Image (cartoon, rainbow, N blue to C red):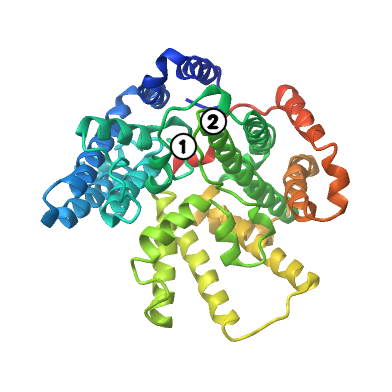
Amino acid sequence: MLFNSFAFVVLLLITFTLYYTPRLYRLQIPILIVSSLIFYSYNQPVLVLLLLGSITINIFTSYYVTYGNQDRRKLYAILGVVLNLATLLFFKYSPLFGRTLFRETSSIGEFLITIPLPIGISFFTFQGISLVVDVFKQNYFRDHDIIPASLSQHAMRTAFFIGFFPGLVAGPIVKAHDFLPQIEAKKFKDIDWERCFRLLVLGYFLKMVIADNLKEFTFWITYPYFQGFKTIPLIGLLFGYSFQIFADFAGYSLIAIGLAKLFGYNFKDNFNFPYISTSFKEFWKRWHISLSSFLMEYLYIPLGGNRRGKARTYVNLMLTMILGGLWHGAAWSYAVWGTFHGLALAVERFVTDRIRINPNLLVNTLKGMMVFCFVTLAWLLFKLPDFSHVIEYFKAMSLNQGLMSGSVLLYIMLYSIPVILYHIHYLVRERTVYERVRQVEYLPYGLMVFLIITNSGPAGAFIYFQF
């Protein structure tokens, strides 16, 4: 079910009404669980069984880590992590293994290729891992009220944590130690309406007006259509896709954060104006923050981080980014994308350890342009998962003498400008001149509401649904 569908609006209104009915306060968690299961199973009902299976695995492993035989705590934790990863590997990467290791005509290869990819599996399995690991660490859960002694109560809270619909299918990835302490009765009077309004309007604007319109033109990046365009349009299409993927995923995250806040729960920010980054390290602190922080906390640091010498630091960095790339999709191009970013981070770390450059406006501008151009070129691996098509695209950019398609560039520029202004707004908002703008700050939200109503693009699934 899409956030921008009529069915979702109906489900949201019914859920919101029941949730804040005073006589039903004790049923708030069950109400959200039922709504979340309806939300997830709306298009493919059978796949809800996988979600329930994942929830069941994490209920029992996390519970027995806390209340089981204390000599086996580590065993239960390892079992929980392994089962979560096995679920992810089987359903997400079987087609990749089938194409790589077997002939498609073989019975095994044919079976592996036909295994469906459940929406959101990359997100809810990571949240399951977060629960098991956080419980095992104990430092986040010294208060046993967070992990209740009653298995039935723990089952209810775990199902809610993993299945809560705002972040269920495309994040943000929520860590157990951030979410579970928030579970309590919520009151209608405590809703921060202004904050919810801002988040939802901006999120829907980025998705429905910017991303959904841009996708009508970045469609030409797909093979073989790009072969008919000249160099400049091909570059313009690529930059348009860079703005589209930001608007699409940042828009989804803002909607998810706003919806969670409507029900009294706080998700951390997932995007922090990433295209103003002047280093690759800064970019990964601003882009898909929930994933980068998850990989840092649950992979990079356990591998040793930067505590075991410089050589090991580079190895850990590369391994984290390659696995982070593969997390995005079952194709080797995603591993290449992760490798590119890992190399960029490693080279940047190597250079900055040896060369000190005094920052100034010119230097920061040049560094920011370099980071943005690199990130934009790398996004091509997302749009064209077949690596041979990526090579063809770069050949076309250097050799093509086809159509100019100025109208395509014009529309890409038109729908990219709001994303650019969004980032510029962040850069200037702390300055004195912004104090004058703040007095009419509500006007852009009115304009965004108007454009959502009058100029939304054709509705489509969010890009990160495929991950």
Q: CA distance from mark 1 to mark 2?
A: 9 Å
| Mark 2 residue crowding within 10 angstroms, few (<14) / some (14–19) / many (20+) | many
Which residue is at 67% across, 34% downward? 198
Can you name the residue that lies furthest to the bottom here? 354
Q: Which residue is mark 2?
A: 259
**Is 286 on the left or on the right of 43, as rendered?**
right
Name the kind of residue labelled 2 in the image.
Leu
Which residue is at 21% across, 47% downward? 66
Q: Are marks 1 and 2 in contact (CB under 8 Å)?
A: no
In terms of image quadrants, where is residue 183?
Answer: top left
Q: Nearer the viewer, residue 330 or 272?
A: 272
Q: Is residue 245 visible?
A: yes
User: Which mark, residue 236?
Assistant: none
Q: Nearer the viewer, residue 9 or 395?
A: 9
Which residue is at 43% across, 46% downward? 178
Q: Residue 295: horizontal and vertical position, in percent?
A: 42, 58
**Is 316 on the left or on the right of 374, as rendered?**
left
Image: 242 above or below 164: below
Name the kind of residue labelled 1 in the image.
Gly
Quadrant for the C terminus in the image: top left
Query: Which marked residue is nearer to the observer: mark 1 or mark 2?
Result: 2
Query: What is the number of callouts on the image?
Result: 2
Q: Is residue 386 visible?
A: no
**Nearer-N-terminus badge (1/2):** 1
Q: Which residue is mark 1?
A: 167
| Mark 1 residue crowding within 10 angstroms, few (<14) / some (14–19) / many (20+) | many
Regarding mark 1 in the picture, which secondary structure is present there?
A: helix
